Amino acid sequence: MITAEVIARRAMRMLQAKANADRARGARRYFRETVEFFGLKSAEVTEMAAELFQAVKKEWTMRQAVELCEILLPDSRLEAKGVATLVFLKFKKEFGPDTFAVIKKWLLAGWCANWASVDTLCPKAMEAVFTRHPELAGQMKGWTESPNRWVKRAAAVSFIHLARRGRQLETAYDICRRLFPVEDDLIQKAGGWLLREAGKTDPDRLEKFLLKHGPHIPRTTLRYAIERFPEVKRKKLLTATKS
C-alpha cells in the first residue's frame, strides 16, 4: 500500500514544482492572519488533489486520508493544507462520529487557522457527517462558545450546504443567534453567509428571523444575510432592524 508519508512527499514535490513567488505575495492580501503560500491557483490545487487521489483510491480508506491531513495540515502554506483537505473529502462516504471529533481536533490544534482552510474543510465534511448522523448537528451549538475563532466560524459554515437545501434550518438559525454577540468580523460574515443560504429555500422565515432579532444582529451579519433580497426590501430591513 502507498503510505500517507509517500503521498505527502509527492504532494510537496508537486507544490514546489508549481510554486510562484509573485502569486504567493499577492495572495497574502486576502488574509489578516499570517498565512504562507506556494503561489498556486485554486484550480491547480484541485487538479493536484484529484491526481493524488487517483493514485490511492483503490487502496486507501478514510484512515489513511486522516494520516495525510495530519502530515500536511500543520504546514503553514495554504496549498499544502488544501491538497490534504481535498483528498480527505474524497472519502466523505465514510465520514461518521469519529470524523466530527477529528475535525474539531484539527481546528483546536491551529492547523486550519484561516478562513479559507475552514471553509474548504467544514461545509462538505460536516454535511456528510450530519447527513448520516443528524443527531450530531446539535453539538455544534457548543462550538459557538469556544474561545477559538476558527471553531466558532466552523460552527456556522458547517451548515452552509445543508441550509442551502433547506435542511437543519432550526439548528442553523440557532447557531447564528448564538454568534450575534461575537465582535469578530470573520464570525459575523460567516453568520451572515449562513443566514443568506438558509433564506434561499425559505425567504419568509429569514425575513421574520431578521425582524425578530434585528437590534441584536451585527450589521455585517445583516448585510450578508439580505444580499439576495430585492433592493427595496433590503433597505426596509436595514431600517427596521436598527437599534
Image: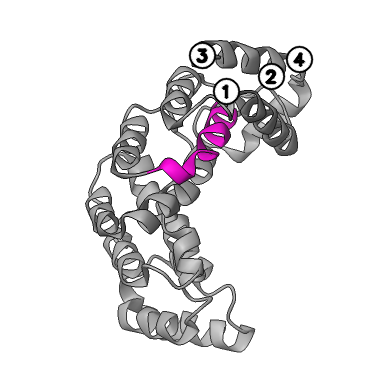
Residue closest to the eye, 93 or 68: 93
The secondary element bearing badge 2 is classed as helix
Can residue 11 be seen in this snapshot? yes
Name the residue: 54% across, 41% down. Answer: 116
- In this rendering, is residue 163 above or below 150? below
Q: Nearer the viewer, residue 101 or 180?
A: 101
Dot 3 amino acid type: Thr
Q: Which of marks 4 and 1 is nearer the N terminus?
A: 4
Which span of residues is magenta-colored? 81-95
Q: Residue 206 carries which label?
A: none
| Amino acid carrying mark 4 in the image | Ala
Q: Which residue bears the numbered disc 3?
A: 3
CA neighbours of label 2 inside 10 A, class few (<14), some (14 to 19), many (20+)? many
Q: Sequence order check: which comes first, mark 4 or mark 3?
A: 3
Q: Quadrant of residue 194?
A: bottom left
Rounded to the nearest whole Å, what is the CA distance between mark 1 and mark 2? Answer: 10 Å
Secondary structure mainly formed by the magenta segment: helix
Q: Do the numbered discs 1 and 3 sit on residues whose CB atoms are within 8 Å? A: no
Q: Which of the two discs, 1 and 2, sits closer to the camera?
A: 2
Q: In which quarter of the image is the C terminus?
A: bottom left
Labels 1 & 2 near each other (Cβ < 8 A) = yes
Viewer-nearest residue: 131 or 147: 131
Mark 1 / mark 3, whichever is N-terminal: 3
The residue mark sitting in front, 3 or 2, is: 3
In three-dimensional space, the C-alpha distance between marks 4 and 1, rounded to whole angstroms, equals: 14 Å
Residue occupied by mark 2: 15
Q: Mark 1 is on which residue type?
A: Arg
What number is the disc on residue 77? Answer: 1
Q: Distance between the residues labelled 1 and 3?
A: 22 Å
x, y percentage for residue 57? 58, 30
